[in-house]
Image (cartoon, rainbow, N blue to C red):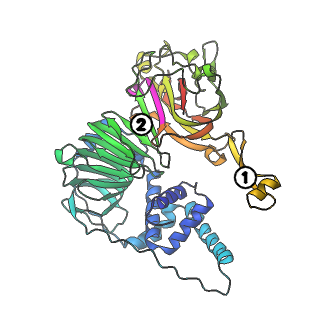
Amino acid sequence: MRFPSPEFDDAVAAACHGIADEQTLAALAELLQADDAALDEYLLRTELHSTLLTASHLVDPVDPGSILALATTASRPDVVTANDRREQRRARAAVWAGAAVLGLIVAAMLGSTSRSEKHNRPSDEQPTAIAPPVEQPRPAPQVVGTFGSIDSAEWVAADTIVREGDPLRSGRRIELASGSVRLYFASGAVVRLTGPAIFEAESSMTAVLTMGRVAVTADTPESKGFTIRTRTGRIVDLGTEFTAEALPDGRCRIGVSSGAVSFHPGERGAGHLLRAGDVMEVEPGQRQVITRIEQGDESPAFRFPSIEPPADDDFADRSRGQASIRSVLGRLYSNLPKAASADPEILFDGRGQTNPDAPEESLYFADDETGGLLIDLGESVPLTKINVYSWHRCMNPGFADDLRYAHRERAAQNFVLYAHTGTSISGQEADAGQGARAGQGALAWHETRVAQEPPSVDADPASSGWTLIARVNSDAYFGLKGPSRPAQQASSVSSARGTLGKYRYLLVVVQPTTGINNDGTPQNFGTFFGEIDVYAD
């Protein structure tokens, strides 16, 4: 493992979230022992991770309509001073990073050292000195803009002193624990950075957002093409106002208020055009999973700006007789004779609901319960796209008019999508003749894929063998609640790399949405799902 590198970024994120494996922790520990700069960066990111967990603005929904106000809010200059940067980070590491994370790193350090001494070096032999990697010189810093208004800023390195009007130089890292700062780039772009965040200006036209949230206004001819880079790709302005949010787990969320932006996954990915009102969320990882959620026209035709209507020719449609679906977590809603959820097979009938309050045409789980749907595609296939549709506007006469209008919780989509190949790999003994022909002695071994039942869904799916594909939360995506929620929605999960992977099983873990009951009290409701379409090569 090297520092800096994407591998280091992923390892620190995994360690912070408690999902790093032993090999990753050992490699990270070895690097932290040998490289003080990597250790400082690790401590910084664990500090910010801890802060991000308690910072409400980074878990609140993104509101594209508020971007202009965020980018232009007036504020006062502020100055913060304190102690030496490195010593302060090291002294506070146990508090910020958390005992669990540091414990894993220390354990990995000890394990790595003992394994190295035991297996790689005789006891009477001195370790061989390894020359440190040669660092490439960085370009001399250039003035690329100025600091604007600073509002209640607290810096991670508390000895930082920043005043309004100070020059913004290329290569300068802005490590903001809380508060916000406005940055004026020489190109005319204006960036409002809100902490906790790590941000670096590269030039008058480019910047890197490692963590945190920015609101960008780039509406001058000179600023067209202004680019924000994140771990998941590049956001290129086409004359617009937009927000970009880099979450600590590596996800990136983009919202466009006006104009358009082009998002390019990775370093060379083809651009995805986002226009005013569009929001996109991108998962980290090689597959570059992209999630779009759109508002429909609230008709039985289920028309959306770019997502297809429900289809009867997708791989999972029941007319093909290939796929099956069943409920594996939670209870389906039942309040007979008044209303009850349809069976899960309704989601493979090739169409959505015929009206906005159709329980008999919808699958929905009991109030307050987490639900789970297991889809068996019958064989392992390369998946290209998964679309999920929902529609609900309360028509219940038992609700007061104002509550009925606001009662759209059952349209919101809040689920996590997992997948599993449905196979395992085992070594099989071949015949002696084959082994001799292969030059491997009397016997030869080869890998064989064996059909396997899907892992358990009772525990955490990711820890029991399921692969996380995407996290969908339309309330956070749209930044809307109550009567502002779209009553008809579609989510579409795809990959910038062409396929999501080759899988047989899909697991959809559904969370309820908090809303208001007919007596005005809070209540968690199950979403009215109308269709799930699965596309495969």
Is the residue under label 1 in contact with that under label 2 (CB below 8 Å)? no
Q: CA distance from mark 2 to mark 1?
A: 46 Å
Specify whether 459 is left or right of 409. right
**Mark 2 / mark 1, whichever is N-terminal:** 1
The residue drawn where x is 41% and y is 72% is 86
User: Is residue 96 positioned above or below 73 on the image?
Assistant: below
The span shown in magenta is 481-493
Specify whether 75 is left or right of 312. left
Determine which quarter of the picture holds residue 26: bottom right
* Amino acid type shown at disc 1: His
Per the image, label 2 sits on a secondary structure element best described as helix
Does the stretch in magenta take in 324? no
Residue 477 numbered mark, or none: 2
* Amino acid type shown at disc 2: Tyr
The one nearer the camera, 344 or 78, is: 344
The quadrant of the image that shows the C terminus is top right
User: Is residue 217 positioned above or below 381 on the image?
Assistant: below
